[in-house]
Image: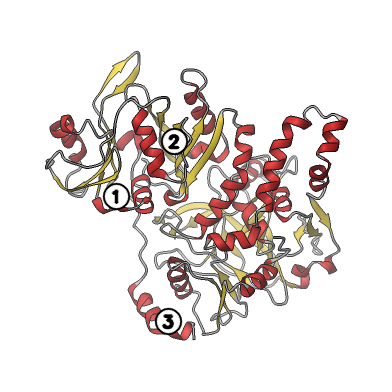
Amino acid sequence: MNHPNLRAFLDVLKKEGQLTEISAAVDPNLEIAEIHRRVIDEQGPALLFTNVKGSKFPVVTNLFGTSRRVDLAFGPKPEQFMRQVVGAMDTLIPPTPKALWNERQLIFDLMKIGTKQVPPTAAPVLQVCNKSAPLAGMPVLTCWQEDGGPFITLPLVYTEHPENGHHNLGMYRMQIYDDRTTGMHWQIHKGGGFHYHEAEKRNKPLPVTVFLGGPPALIASAIAPVPEHLPELMLTSLILGAKLPVAADPTGAPHRIVAEAEFAICGKVPPHERRPEGPFGDHYGYYSLTHDFPVFHVDHVWHRKDAIYPATIVGKPRQEDYYLGEFLQRLLSPAFPMAMPGVKDLWTYAETGFHPLAAAIVRESYKREALASAFRILGEGQLTLTKFLIVTDQPVRLENFPQLLEAVLERFDPHQDLMIFGNTSHDTLDYTGDRLNHGSKAVLLGVGEPVRSLPAVYMEGELPGIRAAAVYCRGCLVVAGAAYADDPELPQRLLEQAGHRLTAWPLVIVADDAAIAQGQTPFLWTVFTRFNPAADIYANAEVRRNRLAYELPIVIDARMKPGYPDELFPREDIVELVDRRWKEYFS
């Protein structure tokens, strides 16, 4: 598929019965978000709201909310092309005339990648320019009732390094403060944040251009976990299969404008200026809290005469980011062995918000090579913020977490295969650590031949302080007892009083509700967003040669704890409003 802009993609969705137009008047404050959430829960279509209160611009959401729409957006060609590129490395390095001839079609395709300059008159985004109150009238959504205000949720934030000019395109939420200023949620591991850090060291403002819409490939590239120095606009071009048209900004602003975008918001972020940003209901399924972040000052906004405002709504998995994340991981997976030799496959789990959990299949050609690969993964780009990493050498489907976990638990040696590292970085959105951006990590290995058989049925009888027990997969037991606030010592007491009865179960999860064992999404979301490895993993252990050698079972306390942000729930009156109007929306 080669969709040059958003509206070309919408035309395809309409033709395929994957787009529903809603002409009833809707409020961007909470109402649109509640409609969207219900539709995505039902695997429903993309939504085009054409009558949005307070704005002349229509709003489109749920563009990528099913695997089918992701396929319609990108098709198989980008993945095939990436495999071709990686596969050709062995034959093209070093290059020979015969190798170049054999790969001539690939080389021809590679010559199509890049940007191409077009005149401003050929750039639809440059049709209208707003300068006096540039953000006024934009249909920016408020998605959750405790949000600090309306947020732009699909911003494609373009920056350039102040010294070498290398660019970054990232997706960083933007809270609207007024008609000229927004927050800029640059987290500690984001490329745009690195550029701002360099500008701030020089005491200079950083020019910023924020694109809304454009080719679906542009949206995908902004969230792709590519290495820091890989240009995202090149990835956009690769997915497009053509050069990306850009035009000079007629105002003289320094950045080139993506010609086929719907909006281009142009301005700068001054050094040393901070403002409270948040709360915001984020893709972890909780409210990220209020913290000081840089401030984006908008000079002017370009937009098409008939611009469409794209948005997404995040919350408890599975949301739209799940399906985009699946595509991007498939697209980039052939390149993992090039960047990280020994890593055969890698997966991060959207059900957890991505950074809390990753898994890898690695080579184990000599003793403990898997551990070397684990360290390599934890040192690579955004993967440095992985909280819990599971590594095996078995050919499992990483997306199938029960299959992975069983393979690892069959092979896991607790004396040497669990490593916990305290005082490390955490994702900014992960509040399980002691303070913002600070936490811990764990690595769990399971390689070689099986060393135990795993139980599939719990038959060990009642456990002290436990009201319910359920099996998630072979070898993993979920138990529920009192809330953390009422009994913080429950995991330790369970280990002391009943650990000897649970040694057949390598992994025991203490949760608020044992019913999370019924499915992959509730299990992963609950467990990995609610524990900090250094604080919440319990096991009997002894020190051997300056390291901890653990005994089974390993107990993880995955209960909600005081100080965690609130879980996301829609406001009752909005739920009732949407209930009443449901037939009106879809009549």
Q: Position of residue 292 (x, y in %)?
A: 49, 52
- Return the mark for residue 517: 1
Q: Amino acid at mark 3?
A: Trp
Q: CA distance from mark 1 to mark 2?
A: 20 Å
Q: Examine the rendered structure and indicate whether residue 573 appears above or below residue 558.
A: below
Q: Position of residue 90 (x, y in %)?
A: 72, 30
Residue lying at the far right of the rendered structure = 97
State which tag comes first along the sequence, 3 or 2. 2
State which tag comes first along the sequence, 1 or 2. 2
Q: Residues within 10 Å of mark 1 (few under 14, many from 20)?
A: many
- Return the mark for residue 582: 3
Residue at 56%, 62% in the rendered image? 68
Residue linked to disc 2: 389
Q: Residues within 10 Å of mark 2 (few under 14, many from 20)?
A: many
- Scheme of image coloration: secondary structure
- Return the mark for residue 277: none
Q: Secondary structure at mark 1?
A: helix
Q: Examine the rendered structure and indicate whether residue 105 appears above or below residue 256.
A: above
Q: Residues within 10 Å of mark 3 (few under 14, many from 20)?
A: few
Q: Check contact, mark 3 vs mark 2: CB within 8 A.
A: no
Of 215 and 446, which appears nearest the observer? 446
Q: Secondary structure at mark 2?
A: strand
Is 335 left or right of 504, judged from the image as shown? right
